[in-house]
Image: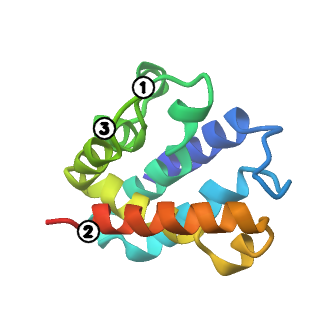
Amino acid sequence: MDNLITNAERVARATHEGQTDKTGVPYITHPERVARTAAQRAPEHLREQAQAVAWLHDTVEDTGVTLQGLREQGFPETVVAGVDAMTKRQGEPVESYFERVRANNLARIVKAADIDDNTNPERVQKLDHADRTRLAAKYQRSRELLTLE
């Protein structure tokens, strides 16, 4: 299974190459941190798959990678389904998105880690006031929707 994480990291590094976040930091550091947090939070039997989903969680949404492409690269359907659950659809209501995330154990673990990384005070303080305010409201709502039962 270690191969699973290595392959997910390889795909993420290749597809996010050259991308930067809002503060100019290489984007790949985001999925790297999310994978580390997901590994800490996931139950042992889901840990490796959660790390793989974390590495890949933005590839379909933000790059040319497709779900079928992930399958063709040998990723198991559980990982592809986790990535699919985390991939936002154009025009999709946020409530529908989070309903899909909550229905997938891997996506739920990774999304919580993703929100935590996106609200990390060290990162957020580097943004301008308008972005900080907008993102604080967005991620507060995201946390609420993720924890609905």
Give the residue drawn at x 79%, y 65%: 128
Residue 7: % across, % down: 56, 41
Q: What residue type is labelled 3?
A: Ala
Label 2 – label 3 distance at C-alpha: 20 Å
Q: Name the residue under label 2.
A: 147
Give the residue drawn at x 52%, y 51%: 5
Q: Name the residue under label 1.
A: 67
Give the residue drawn at x 42%, y 38%: 87
Q: Which mark is residue 81?
A: 3
Is 105 positioned to the left or the right of 131 in the image? left
Residue 126: % across, % down: 80, 70
- Verify CB contact (< 8 Å) between mark 1 and mark 3: no
As helix, strand or loop, the secondary structure at mark 1 comes to helix
Is 76 positioned to the left or the right of 32 in the image? left
Against 67, residue 8 (above or below) is below
Is 130 positioned to the left or the right of 56 in the image? right
Give the residue drawn at x 73%, y 79%: 122
Front residue of 124/62: it is: 124
Front residue of 108/120: it is: 120
Is 91 positioned to the left or the right of 127 in the image? left
Of the numbered discs 1 and 3, the one sitting upstream in the chain is: 1
Crowdedness of circle 3 by 10 Å Cα count: few (<14), some, many (20+)?
some
Residue 129: % across, % down: 74, 68
